Amino acid sequence: MTSFELTRLLPSDHFARALREDVRRGLTAPAKSLPPKWFYDKRGSELFEDITRLPEYYPTRAERAILTARADEIAAATKARTLVELGSGSSEKTRLLLDALGALGTLREYVPVDVSESALREAGRRLAEDYPGLAVHGVLNDFTASLGLPGEVPAPRLVAFLGGTLGNLNPAERSAFLTALRAELSPGDSLLLGTDLVKDPAVLVAAYDDSAGVTAEFDKNLLNVLNRELDAGFDPEAFEHVALWNAEQEWIEMRLRSVRAQRVPVPGVELTVEFAEGEELRTEISAKFRREGVAAELATAGFALRHWWTDPEGRFGLSLAEP
Ligand code: AVJ
């Protein structure tokens, strides 16, 4: 019998409070911005799944190609009894790891960690159907706010942080995050880290500004989240989606550009937010990496890089590291 259990690591009002804090800070700053975690309500999580199937959005396919080729090697190297996945989303690519660790016979427990309760429940339901005997322990958590892995899971643990989600953090946040993660791990545990790589900016920009407009809808869905959660008065039609390559920082930025001057009430935080015509709200950074940079960031946080793999076209990198 598969079991699915969901734990909330944070107080029940955490997300409501954190959203208000982020909105107060991000929409009153001279350069407006919001952290990308607020994209992922039920609709946003679905739109992201749609993005992963777009012809322009290569990272999911590239990472899946690496996992397909290397899952057995990863299983043999880690012998994990628990697979913890940070930002698990639909857990689709994770199946490759579950299969390999299952075949090796070490796997006991899968611990998906995500900010989206709907994504956790949906993934848990599907995995329960397909993996009889696997204990699935979902954790609703914001690992950028407090890492907190569930303590009582069988060692050794393999922590997977896939999809390039590390790139949503800026360098200081990445360093703090990796250092905190390192502190949670013990000898024998491992980290599997997926990072999208620097490449032709035209390819990168197309991946974040697809011709079908799915990414634009995903970006604007953030405004629907603010309207619902904070009773805000955003008109998504009054903003346009922008994706650009920041060559100096080596990251993609997504922004919402106000098509006209407007004042938007946000009663949930007692604000009226003014936008000038053409003013932009930054909604995401998605950093792109090079092997040396990944190795250096891991080393600074106290990890040793054991394996580095890319897809045949060198678009995406997968690192296996040890504390
Ligand atoms: C889920 C964070 C890896 O940065 O590529 C996709 C999110 N944003 N298209 C990424 C995203 C726009 C994605 N991550």
Image (cartoon, grey):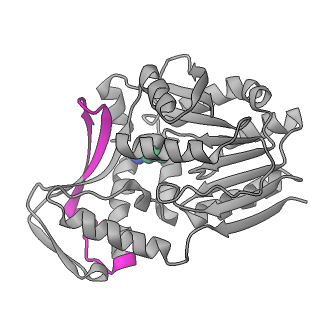
Q: Looking at this rendering, what residue extends furthest in the top direction?
A: 312
How many marks do you count on the picture? 0
Q: Quadrant of residue 168?
A: top left
Q: Residue 90 magenta-drawn?
A: no
Q: In this view, does 54 lie to the left or right of 161?
A: left
Which quarter of the rendered picture does the N terminus lie within?
bottom right
Query: Residue 10: x percent and y percent?
Result: 56, 70
Q: Is residue 247 magenta?
A: yes
Residue 189 position (above or below residue 136): above
Q: Which of 253 and 171 is in front in this view?
A: 171
Whole-percent x, y for residue 15 in the image: 47, 71
Give the residues in magenta.
228-255
Residue under the point 33% across and 59% down: 220
Q: Is residue 170 visible?
A: no
Residue 282 visible within the image:
yes
Assign the C terminus to one quadrant of the image: top right
Residue 294 located left or right of residue 30: right
